[in-house]
Image: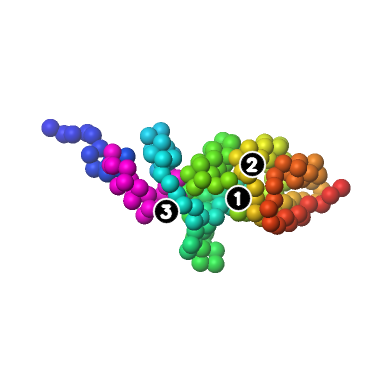
């Protein structure tokens, strides 16, 4: 008799809480996020874990939407490309679907919840990449992020008018340490 069940998988969720906690300590942040997104039960289990946040979170909005998790030895970036940059590994872990902004918000929410972050270490925002979504992105940040340590506000093309969005960002986001603005005000 052939058994079609998947008995070759290790049932992490069925382990006692302390065992699951020890497994999570050995997991990479990207593995934790991937695990969280596998099922509702995995999401609930992950949210019950306590992660002492040794990771810095960076958000980037340019031609791709990115989430960087900076740890002790490496940088993991959640975007569509894979590359190596100054010895830091950029690994592809998430492909965006039809609406990259909504998918980015969805994953951001997971990352902020899992690592219990209310302050983003770095926000880099090209205001003219997703002009129609700027207000939505800023509103998302305002409701999910207490403050930003370092903020880089840029625009790709001088002729793009993003003055109102730049002002809206500064009115709605608390920048704790450093603000770099490279906007061409009209």
On the image, numbered disc 1 is attached to which residue? 120
Would residue 126 be counted in the magenta stretch? no
Give the numbered dot on residue 4. none
Q: Which residue is mark 3?
A: 28
Point out residue 86 in the picture as x, y percentages from the top left corner.
Answer: 54, 67
The answer to whether residue 7 is visible is: yes
Quadrant hosting residue 13: top left
Task: Find the distance from the CA under tag 1 to the CA under tag 3.
Answer: 19 Å
**N-terminal label among 1 and 2:** 1
Circles 1 and 2: CB atoms closer than 8 Å: yes
Q: Badge 2 is on which residue? A: 141
Of mark 2 and mark 3, the one earlier in the sequence is 3
Please tell me which residue lies in front, 63 or 183: 183
Residue 81 seen in the current view: no
Q: Count neighbours of disc 1 (C-alpha within 10 A) and say few if under 14, some if 14 to 19, many if 20 or more.
A: many
Could you say where residue 118 lies in the image, as x and y percent from the top left? 58, 46
Which residue lies most toward the left here? 1
């Amino acid at each position: 008799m052939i058994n079609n069940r998947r008995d070759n998988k290790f049932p992490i969720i069925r382990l006692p809480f302390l065992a699951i906690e020890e497994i999570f300590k050995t997991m990479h942040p990207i593995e934790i996020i991937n695990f969280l997104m596998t099922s509702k039960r995995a999401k609930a289990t992950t949210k019950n874990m306590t992660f002492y946040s040794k990771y810095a979170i960076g958000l980037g909005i340019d031609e791709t939407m990115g989430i960087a998790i900076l740890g002790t030895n490496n940088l993991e970036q959640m975007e569509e490309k894979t590359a190596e940059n100054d010895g830091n590994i950029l690994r592809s872990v998430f492909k965006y679907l039809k609406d990259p902004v909504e998918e980015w918000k969805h994953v951001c929410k997971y990352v902020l919840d899992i690592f219990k972050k209310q302050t983003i270490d770095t926000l880099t925002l090209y205001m003219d990449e997703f002009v129609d979504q700027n207000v939505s992105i800023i509103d998302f940040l305002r409701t999910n992020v207490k403050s930003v340590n370092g903020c880089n506000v840029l625009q790709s093309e001088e002729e793009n008018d993003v003055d109102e969005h730049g002002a809206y960002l500064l009115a709605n986001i608390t920048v704790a340490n450093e603000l770099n603005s490279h906007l061409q005000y009209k």
